[in-house]
Image (spheres, grey):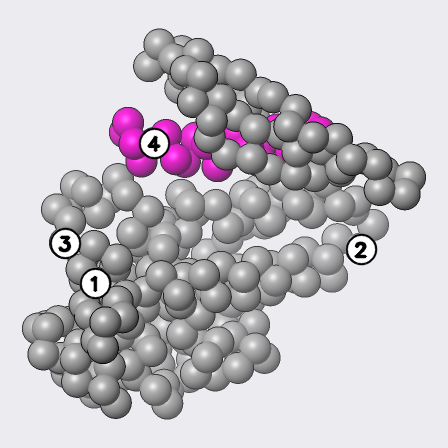
Amino acid sequence: MALKKLLSLLGNKSTKNDKDFKNWVKITTGYFPKNVSLYQQAFFHSSASAKKSGAKINNERLEFLGDAILGAIIADYLFQIYPFKDEGFLTQLRSRIVNGQKLKELALKFGFNDFLRASLTKDEKTKSSAYGDAFEAFIGAVYLDMGYVKTKKFVISKIVKVHLDVDNLVNTNVDYKSQLQIFCQKKKLTLEYKLISEETQGANKLYVMQVFVDNKPYIQFENFSKRIAEQKAAQLTLEELSKELG
């Protein structure tokens, strides 16, 4: 209740009318919210953080939780519908579904731009990860308010089956290393992949790969497949560079 009052005092016009906002949540998720302040907080970007008792109030913690919950739901779904595919296939397909660009597209489809509160210009919102972050935070809010079973039903029935063509994603070959190479060439930046560590675990080897752009260290990623580790590191680095350089 304290958070709800604080958000109202901060003048978030989009969420002042609790009845309308609750109805929007109900239409979006299929469930009427029990704790509306959780959903309000999901739209409170870090650039517009408020302070209460010395602590910052924004959507970062919900984003952290939502990222984990969404990843688990998608992993479980793919595990069930592709019973004979290996870990590499499932990992790559999940990353195509939950990458920053895809989450931003989904957020805009659901109308998150009508509710996002951020100290950013319209152009900055579009170029940043703000919409994708809010989407993950919203998933976190649904989970805390409704529990895992209802959150999973919402994600699968309202998101995956309606807005995602999984078969098309399977047939789309996304080569993030090539994309990153092209990006760096356009920006006249040097690109290098370094093996940070190689650890034997049973019959497998765990590789930790890191991307360096203009000798600056960027994303590290580990996987039992060196190729997947490089691809994922390239994907995350590309997203980071896109935020920095546009």
**Amino acid type indicated by mark 1:** Ser
The reply to whether dot 3 and dot 2 touch (C-beta < 8 Å) is: no
Q: CA distance from mark 4 to mark 2?
A: 35 Å
- Secondary structure beneath label 1: loop
Q: Which residue is mark 1?
A: 49
> Where is mark 4, residue-wise?
242
Rendered image: mark on residue 83: 2
Mark 4 or mark 2, which has the lower sequence index?
2
The residue tagged with tag 4: helix, strand or loop? helix
Q: Which quadrant is home to the C terminus?
A: top left
Locate the N terminus and report the quarter of the image it occupies.
Answer: bottom left
Quadrant of residue 196 in the image? top right
Q: Secondary structure at mark 3?
A: loop
> Tags 1 and 3 in contact by the CB under 8 Å rule?
no
> In the rendered structure, does residue 238 fall within the stretch colored magenta?
yes
Question: Which badge, 1 or 3, is on the more N-terminal residue?
Answer: 1
Indicate the position of residue 207 as horizontal and vertical percent values. Answer: 71, 33
